[in-house]
Structures are given as structure tokens and as C-alpha cells.
Amino acid sequence: MPEMPEVETVRRGLISQVKGRKITNVEIRYQNLITGDVDQFKEFVTGTTITDIGRRAKFLLIHLDNGYTIISHLRMEGRYKISADPSAIDKHSHAIFTLDNGQKMIYNDVRKFGRMQLWNTDDLENNKSIQKLGPEPLSAAFTFNNLKPRIMRHRKDIKTVLLDQSVMSGLGNIYVDEVLWKVKIHPETPADHLNDTDIQNIIEVSNGEMEKAIASGGSTVRSYVDATGHKGNMQNSLKVYGKEGTPCPRCGTDIEKIKVGGRGTHFCPKCQVIK
DNA sequence: CTCAGTGTTATAGC
DNA sequence: TGCTATAACACTGA
């Protein structure tokens, strides 16, 4: 479900609904959701107040007033919903945070891929997962000089390289396909074959796509809804993802779907040619 | 019944 | 050591 724009949309929804609220109880129904000791997680979180909610790439950062942060990754289908209605809790609700206003912040995840971890707020940059993240779109570090060497030292397919969160972070399978279509680069082009213009285009288009997707409230593909249950609109703006067999909006050639690095990959065989 | 699915990480092989 | 490819995670829906 979530790439960077969807996580950002979730972040904004959570801020408006749970920032400043005290967590009076924590229930973990799926033990593997928590990386680390589950009892310690519950003990450290219970009784704290949510001071703010941040984000680094696709990681949600729920900051608490005791100096700890819940690092939450939604992976494929994780989602939060806020509700006081007991019927909002089902067999896919794996963590339930009761708030001091009677509402519950419920973490749902059909595939159980998502993870939560407690970490010192002042030490987030040393967390194993966050530490390895490359620059993300719309951030100060997302520059030509930073990105060019990170991308071009690989000889793998450019699609695989852009999905590698240690090269640059935030883009996932949907938006990588969209970006590569927009910059007219074939997904199987070896990364070290790109030129400066390609790199510059990838940077500019990645920024633009992320900005547009966030403004649209994210893409609702399969299961995604924000913290208030609303769907995003970005899927209506997608040009190639899920569009196999339909005409390329630019040249009319049918969009093809292939496998690249094990992931479904959509592209226009005429607009996007391997160098 | 089979297969693909918005993501990350462990493991195997060269 | 380092890079790359593949499997695994767990479940639903087409």
C-alpha cells in the first residue's frame, strides 16, 4: 500500500487526530509486529503522550514524550485507523492504542508484513533501518551531486537501483514505473549507462511526482486508505502502473508489463528504449 | 488451484 | 569482502 506519498498522507491524518493525546493502553495481538521485546514495548509506550509524528522515507515516526519514538513501517498493506467503535477492530488489527479521549488508534495489516520498533528519539539516525536510507525526494540532500555517484556505481537495471532504498529512498514500485516512463528510460537500462541529463531528469521528475501524489492524498491501489478512511486520488493520474495493454498516453503504443528484479514493471516499449 | 501483490531483509552463490 | 539474485514473510482476491 504505501510509498512515500501514502505514508506522508497517513502522517498528516494521524497528526490531526492523535497529536497531544495520551496513550492509556497498548494491546499487541500479533507478537511479530514488534521488533524487540513486546512487553518492554508496551511498558515504555503506555502512559506516554504523542508529541509529534514525523516521517523518514516510508518510515512513520511516532514521537513520545518519554524520549522514545515508535518507528512504524507499513510495508505492503499496513494502515492506521482512528475509531471509538469496537467494530473497527477485526482479525487483522494487530496493535490497538487506546487514547485518553476514548478513541483507539488501530494498526491493521492483512499480510502482517509491517513492523514497529521503539527507539531513542535522539538516536534515530543510528537505527539499523533508517541509517541505510539514501536521500529522499523533496529533501535538501536530493541533489545531482549526491545522487549521481549513488546511482551510477551500480550496473544493475535502473529500476532495481531506484527501488533500492539505500541508493535513494521513498520511491516504490508504482512511482518508479511512473518516473521512468516520464523520463523515457527503459527500466532494464543498466544504471551505469545513464548520462547526466538522465540523472537530472530522474531527480526533477521524482520530486514532481511525489509532490503531486502527496497533494492528491496518495494512490489507492488495492487497500490503501488514510487514517480517516479516505481514499487517495493519485491512482487516477497514473500513466503506466497497472495500465498494461492500454495505449501509452504519449505515443499510443500499448503499455507492456514485464518482470524486472522480481517486480511487476510497466513501460512503453516505444518511448522507453534501452541504451 | 495458481499466481501476483504498494516492501524489506535474510540467505545463497559467485 | 562485495555485489547480485532469489527466497521468505502471510494472506487475499482475481
Image (spheres, coloured by chain):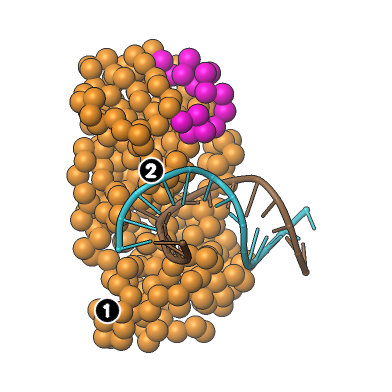
Chain colours: A orange, B brown, C cyan
Would residue A200 be visible to someone looking at this image?
Answer: no
**Residue A185 at what x, y percent from top left?**
43, 77
Q: Main secondary structure of the magenta part?
A: helix
Res A261 quadrant in image: bottom right
> Crowding at label 1, few (<14), some or many (≥20) Cα neighbours within 10 Å?
some
Instruction: Name the subunit of mark 2.
Output: A
Labelled disc at residue A246: 1
* Residue at 57 percent of width and 36 percent of height: A127
How far apart are the alpha carbons under marks 2 and 1? 30 Å
Q: Chain for mark 1?
A: A
Q: Which residue is mark 2?
A: A110
Instruction: Name the kind of residue labelled 1 in the image.
Output: Thr
Q: Is residue A69 magenta?
A: no
Query: In this rendering, is residue A60 above or below A217?
Result: above
For the residue pair B6 and A145, the one nearer the viewer reads as B6
Viewer-proximal residue among A87 and A57: A87
How many marks can you see? 2
Q: Label 2 is placed on what type of residue? A: Val
Q: Nearer the viewer, residue A155 or A95?
A: A95
Q: Where residue A78 sits: x, y (%)?
A: 38, 42
Measured as percent of width and height from the top left, residue A168 is found at: 50, 56
Residue drawn at the location 27% of the way across and 34% of the way down? A81
SS state under label 1: loop
Residue numbers of the magenta segment: A30-46
Q: Is residue A271 above or below residue A262?
A: below
